[in-house]
Amino acid sequence: MKIAVLDDYQQVAREFADFSALEADHDVRIFHEHLGDRDAVVAALAEFDVIAAMRERTVFDRATLERLPNLKFMVTTGNRNASIDMDCLKERGIPCASTGGRLQTTPELAWGLILAVARNIPLEDRNVREGRWQTTIGLDMQDKTLGIVGLGRLGREMARIGQAFRMNVIAWSQNLTAEDAADAGVTRVEKGELFAQADVITIHYKLSERSRGLVDKAAIDAMKPTAILVNTSRGPIVDYVALADALKGGRIGGAGLDVYDTEPLPVGDMMRSLPRTVLTPHLGYVSHDTYRIFYSETVENIEAWLKGEPMRLINS
């Protein structure tokens, strides 16, 4: 069997899992670079029987999958993958397995971005290294309002940490009830109220056709001039053109971004040069403990399938 393990950007797959048993009997290739567009993906992977995807870094839509004639089994890290056309796999009789992960990893990064923007940490770090001293004034968290867009598992983790900072926490999502919000110690408000009232807004929403562009120009225009927007969910949820205009015009306090419309972010993308931003390269799930789970369970899934005993299937 020819087995492809994709998008190991940090070249650490073999540090977090033992591939030796697989490599003893099968041809295992670990790809360290992003493969690129559909034609590049097909050219690189057409001969492989098994493909292991790292989250949603590479798109496997129907048009791509139908050009992979040898494909017999897929694994994705995490418990779901919106970049893989599961219906197409099922029609072709190709099983797809998943792995576990860590709930806290993304909220931890989100709070890192919030504090980095609020206290101007990257700028002040650079200033100290270049000989300057105390050039900015930070935004306090205590007694401020945290607005959470999407009060699911990640949103609830964000709420708990916000409450530890003694923040007033409000939330909105299309299906959120006042009772569910109260159960998390949070006040439900309407979308417009959240963007107008919050000092810090954090996005924790699943990307779908309904949520694409959810944080639109009207929402961004409603934000306080000192407010911070953080997105660790998915890039297309936010209208980045409207966000860029607000940042360039100084109409909001800043933004912390971990996700983008196109990933990896193109070299000349406007997001790279925006003022009052802290940018990270989709690190929400990138941590030692998470990678240990991802890679070890990827190997387990492939070994189980090869034995005819597939496990953790998500499209059966």
Image (tube, grey):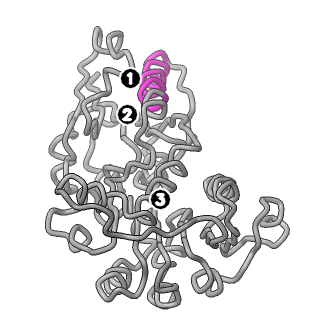
What segment carries the magenta color? 293-307
Q: Which numbered dot is residue 16?
A: 1
Residue 269 x, y percent position in the rendering: 20, 70
Q: Residues within 10 Å of mark 2 (few under 14, many from 20)?
A: some
SS of the residue under disc 2: loop
User: What residue is rendered at 18% in x and 57% in y?
Assistant: 131
Q: Quadrant of residue 242?
A: bottom left
Quick check: is 304 in the magenta stretch?
yes
Under mark 3, the amino acid is Leu
Is residue 123 depicted above or below 193 in this figure?
above
Q: CA distance from mark 1 to mark 2?
A: 25 Å
Q: Does the magenta stretch mainly form a helix, a strand or a loop? A: helix
Of callouts 2 and 3, which one flags the residue occurring earlier in the amino acid sequence? 2
**Left or right of residue 107: residue 213:** left
Total count of labels = 3
SS of the residue under disc 1: helix
Q: Which residue is mark 3?
A: 115
Q: Residues within 10 Å of mark 3 (few under 14, many from 20)?
A: some
Q: Which numbered dot is residue 72?
A: 2
Under mark 1, the amino acid is Phe
User: What residue is rendered at 47% in x and 59% in y?
Assistant: 115
Under mark 2, the amino acid is Lys
Quick check: is 273 in the magenta stretch?
no
Quadrant for the C terminus in the image: top right
SS of the residue under disc 3: helix
| 29 and 196: which is toward the camera | 196
